[in-house]
Each structure stands twice: as structure tokens, then as C-alpha cells.
Image: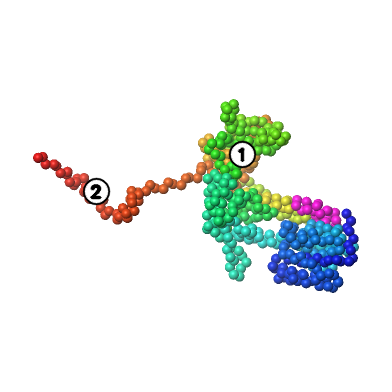
Amino acid sequence: MKDATPNTAIRRTLGYPRVSTREQEIAGVSLDAQAERIANYCRLHALPEPILFPEVESGGEENEANRKKVAALLADVRRGDMVIVTDIDRFGRDVVFIVKNVRQIMRKGAVFVAIDKGFDSRSPMAEDTLANWAVGAEQERRRIKERTEGGRKHLRVQGYFVEGQPPFGYERQPKPKGTKTPLPLRVVPEHAAVVRRMFALSLEGCSVLEIARRLRQEYGNIKAFGRAWVLIALRNRVYTGRIAKTAVRPQATRGAVQLPAEWIPAHEAIVDDETFNNVQLALRDRRRGRKPQAESATANHLLRSICRCAECGGSVAAIPPSRSGRHKVGYYVCRGHVEQKEKGARCKSSAYLRQPDADAAVGEQFLAFARSLLTSLTRPPRQVEKPDFAAQRREVKIARQRVVEFVAKGLFTVEDVKVELNRLDDALAAIEAKEAEFKETAGNDTIETRKHAHAYVQQIVDEWTILQVDVQRALIRAFALKVEATKDKQIRITWRDPSQISAAHGAQELPALRPAPAAAAPPAPSLITSMSPIVAALPAPTMSARDYLGSPERAVAPVQRRKS
């Protein structure tokens, strides 16, 4: 669409001064300084007095939704207006935002002016100049982001928490005067008690929804506990006293699932490692973190909640024996085969598998893999060549630069640029995740961890038949990448690499074979402590009954009654 020709007579001037931090105000680009320059420009060119839209927000892409003033300006601009900024980077530092919105202003028949560079959208070279400045703004924002992230990485390695607001239960310690280095997180006792209560409820078998409800009842004066908040907190390894050396959420999401990372001791723990790992197994192995109820008819189904359909990828349902006695054994079948029948999206390739036969076959496969694992764990860990993650990141950076060049040349539309930049961001996040996973696996798969993992697997082989079903299920989930039911009534299992299992054992991520020992019963109260307070307060006797009566040899003979 061809841009409309703007009116030569300017009816209104709209000024947009912006700063992002207090440091920028000190550096001489404060809101007042920008507003004064815009007003001087209007007086010099005999323009109307400017209507200002001042804003204190970052100009990057990730902060676009928070820039309310620029959104109001763009909504208000109309034919005959002039939008004035002191410099192009005041309008924004995101290439997509700048190109899209300046062109939108021009299409409305308005004029865009950047004072410092003498940019005027009425100039014949406006398009070329705009593209070049947008490239410079994008590159500067990337440099600032790299410097900021580099400082965060340095602090993470030193054991400092730099991920924004500390988790509930911790607080930041004030920095000593004269230093910029932060201190480790400090426990807030009353909040830490709530966190421990939350983990204890999860171990007792409460669902996340039930935990949230009970916390609101017991600690409603402290925080409004929601289900999503509880799930994120139960997944947060920071409560074990560690922090990640790499970002576990590179794209600043608040999801419960985190990227792999190397965790190092950094501050006081609120929950111990065993409690945290058991809670993770509970959340992963049970629906909504809830234990199978004692009356559940599928509690002893080994493949319950861990098997997927090989045909459609859906979950496999565990069906108990019928109460009428028609089906005396349970079955496994794709949930899409049973529940999607009315919606017309039924999984037609799924087959019914008898639960006893399927469980027995899976048990045999697991034992066969465990025995082969015993042989593999006797070998030293293989020397894996480290991928060149730095080169992979450079390739992404070069690809990003190429996109910016295409924008400058007008070869990419705004929509194409946004899609391509999102794809490159995802690729960079995947590289970071693979690097963190490589460091974690390579660091935990050692000769010593293989020795302990060998003893662990040997115990599993020896005790498999007497282990509880929920423990067997947790072991299969920990050792397998995926468990699938095929249409020919077979169970197909893809097992993890021995190095992964060794590393998981070294990181204490494998399930315990025995439940945690129950707390010892308190000793029975003594006779004195169970008596009344008055009797209990009496002094202890200074003489035993034996001393009082004398030894058996010296005991006084009973008095004989005289016969009358």
C-alpha cells in the first residue's frame, strides 16, 4: 500500500520523551531535557505547542505491552499531525516496533521527526534512513542485553540470586555500604514454615489444589495461595539452598517446568534434598501430585499414568475389572479410543491390552534392561566430545544480523521479521538448554557415581518382586524415555542411556526403594509423670525398697500369731 502524502500544514505536534532507568536521567537524557528540546524545535519551526506523552519504560521488544503512553500516542495520531522525538532510540530499540509504527504514522498522513539526526519522514530518503537507524537501535539493544546477561552469569557462578524477586520464604539482604556485590538470600522464618508445610502436605499425598486450599485456611493472613503458585513453588529447587549457574527460564516465563541447569550451593536450605526429590517424584508420578487412593481399582496397575499410545500419542487409560464380573481382569487402552468416540476423533488403531499380561511383560523388559545396565555401569564413562556451543551461538547471531540487513534492504516484511526473530530466539534457548544439560550429565557421570549406581541397580534386580507397585512405576518412569502401547498389543520401551542414569543417581534424582522411616513413637509416660501435679512435685525417695526392707537373708521373719 502506498503511503499517503502528508499535509504540509501541521495541525498538531505530539512529543514523545522516554527514559528507561534513573541512570539515563543522570546521563542527561531526562524527560524534562527531552521535553525542552521538543518545545524548542516547535518554536524554531513555528509549529504548534507540543502535546507531550512522557514515559518511563524500557524500549525493548519484551516491554512493548507496558508502554502505555506510546500506545496512546499511536492511537491518537491523525492526518496533519507531527510526531517528534529527540532521537530514534527514544521511540524504541526494537527494529520491528520502529519500522512498523513509523510507517503506520506515515500511512495516516502524519509526519515523524527525530531531531538529533535531522530525520523527517517527508524526505525522499526517509525509508532508507529509517531502516539504517532501526538496525543501529537493534544492535545497541542486543549489546546492552549481552552486557547485562554477562553480569548476571558472573554473579550466578559466584552463588548469588539474580532472577528478580526471591522465592517466597527468602528475602534479599541489604548490600553493605560501598559495595555493589549482593549477599546470599536470607530465610524469612515465618514464610519458611509455610514452605515446609506445603512440601509436607505434598508428601502426605495431597493434590496441589488441596494444598492451596489448606494453605489459604491456615495461612490466609500471609498470602493468597493459588494452585499455579503452589505448583511453581513445589518445583523450585532454590528451596534446597542452591541456585542455577545458567538461566532456567531464558524467556522469562513463569511455568513450573524448568530447563536443565547446574545447581550449586548458595544459601540456607528450607527443605532437604530427599524431601524435594520425593515431592518431584510424587508430582510426576501421580495425577496432580495425589497418591492413588487405597480404594482405587487401578492402584496396582503398573503402567498407569506412564504409558502413551504409539499410534496417536495420547495417554493410555487404565481400566479396572468390571464390578459385574464380566471382565475379571483390568485392561489398558488409548484414552482417545474410549473418550473421543462421541467427538469423531477416535483413535481407531488402539488395541485392548490385558493388564496382568502387559504388567508382566514390562516387568521382564525392565529386569532385562537393569541386568544389561549392571554390565554397562562397570565400564568407565566414555569421553564425550563437547559440542561447540559458542560456535552454535555465533551462527544464530550471524543469522539475526542477516535478518536485520534484510529489513534495511526492504526484503522482509514486518511479519516475516517477527517470525524469524522468534525462531532464532527459540534456537538460542535450545542451545543454552543443551549446554546446561551437557554440563550436568558430564559432571555427574563419573567412576564414583557409576559405582554407587551399580549397587543401586543391583538392589533393584534383587528386590524387584517385593517392591511396591508405585515404586516399580517410579523406577520405570525414571529409567525410560518413553513407554508406548502398539496396535499389535505390545509394549515398546525406549530406555535412557547408562550415562544419563549414572548422572541422575549422582544428582540424587532416582526414586528411593524404601519409604522414609516413620518417626519413632514417643516414650510411654512414667508413673510419676502421669500422676497428679502435686505427687509429681514430691522429691525423689532417698532409699530404695530393698534398702528399706533389707536383703532377703536379713529380712525379718513374719510374726507368728500366738495361739490362745
Does the segment drawn in magenta span residue 409?
yes
How would you rate the neighbour count of disc 1 (Cα within 10 Å): few for under 14, some for 14-19, many for 20 or more? some
Residue drawn at x 78%, y 62% is 73
Question: Looking at numbered disc 2 in the image, what kind of residue is underneath it?
Answer: Arg
Q: Is residue 279 visible?
A: no
Q: Considering the numbered disc 2 on the image, is that residue within a helix, a strand or a loop?
A: helix
Tell me where residue 57 sits by quadrant: bottom right
For the C terminus, the quadrant is top left
Toward the viewer: 272 or 533? 533
From the image, tell me which residue sits under label 1: 305
Residue drawn at x 55%, y 49% is 214
From the image, tell me which residue sits under label 2: 546
Depicted 107 relative to depicted 516: above or below: below
Question: Looking at numbered disc 1 in the image, what kind of residue is underneath it?
Answer: Ser
Toward the viewer: 113 or 213? 213
Residue 426 at what x, y percent from top left?
72, 51
First to last magenta residue range? 402-423
Does the segment drawn in magenta span residue 349?
no
Q: Is residue 414 visible?
A: yes
